[in-house]
Amino acid sequence: MKKIDTNKQEKETLESAIDHWSKEGYIDEQIASRLRDSIEVKSFEWGVLAKYAFWIALASLVFSVLSLFVDDVFLNFVKRFYETPNIVFFIFFAALAAVFYVVGFRNKEKFPEKTFSNETLMLAGAFSTATSIGFLGQVLDRNELHFSLLFLLSVIIYGVLAVKLDSKLIWTFTLISLGVWFATETAYHSDWGFKFWGMNYPLRFTIFGVLVTLFALLAQPKLKKLQPFQSTSYIVGLLYTMIALWCLSIFGNYSDFEEWTRVRQFHIFYWGLLSTVVSAGLILYGLKAKDNITREIGFVFFILNLYTRFVEYLWDNINRTIFFLILAVSFWFVGLWAERIWKKRE
């Protein structure tokens, strides 16, 4: 008989309920005994360990590579290859990316349950792809090239690989690369100024995020090959929108830092109001549609906006002791509210 995995506290609660039902005569002792035997305290969370182990392994690999650049032995070794053409590095990292993708795809077919190791291989392939494109830019001379096109190339490469390998992780890289391309392309057309068509980066990315979200909701369901990535696009689009809106609520549509510092925050309160209203709208929609992701993103940014406004308007206007006391009390109530919701869900 397959047993139910529970933690120690859950096991005690279930056994207490079974004892109560047995005592009240709802079930006989034989059934009660079988129910008790079907409960087992779950073993160590190996899945969680695997996930964090792969993350640590990847982070260690990155730090290992960075450490090389401060190592004298390595630097002396690199100097010997200083004249090595960039095309060699481009080919090397492109080949390395291909190896990671092939191994990752084969592992995914043979061992689909090994989610973390498979996604780690895909992530390593994505980093190698980005590096190879960077060296391609050096080969083509980025000073002369309209190099934002290289980011567009990375969007195409990641998009094709995400579909072919059915990888949501690589699709996430596709959307991140799309954002980088959007930023550099608009900067290129504004002669590398901070404003494009009168919009600074936060305002531009607010619109960009809305477009990505609408694409996920309206267009992606109609594209069969992109349907598996709809939820990923929706989440990334919302995050683009809300992060940009939050930045917009702080900096407004200003592109000059000195000019922004001379402006009182209440002069751009309408951006803060818009950001807060949108956050509240996401919470209400999430509650109504029982969409936990939308609700939680809305809740996080609603709280973030409230505290941002709190700091903006009160930091210079009230005593620091009172400021932090209000902050402590407000967080206490937020914690109580969150705890109440958590208990209901449990």
Image (cartoon, rainbow, N blue to C red):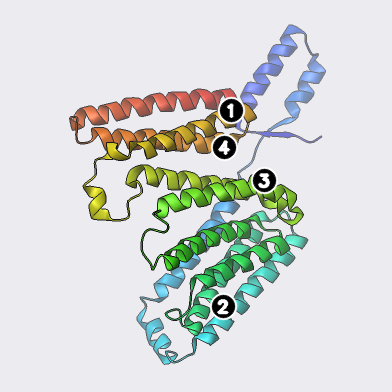
Residue 201: % across, % down = 41, 55
Name the residue tied to disc 1. Answer: 287
Earlier-in-chain disc, 3 versus 4: 3
Q: Secondary structure at mark 4?
A: helix
Name the residue tied to disc 2. Answer: 93
Residue at the far top in the pictured view: 24
Residue at the far front in the pictured view: 197
Q: Residue at x 28, y 26 (%)?
A: 326
Name the residue tied to disc 3. Answer: 218
- Can residue 48 be seen at all in this image of the molecule? no
Name the residue tied to disc 4. Answer: 294
The foreground one among 56 and 100 is 100
Earlier-in-chain disc, 1 versus 3: 3
Residue at the far left in the pictured view: 319
Mark 2 residue type: Phe
Q: Do the residues bearing badges 2 and 1 touch, measured as CB atoms within 8 Å?
A: no
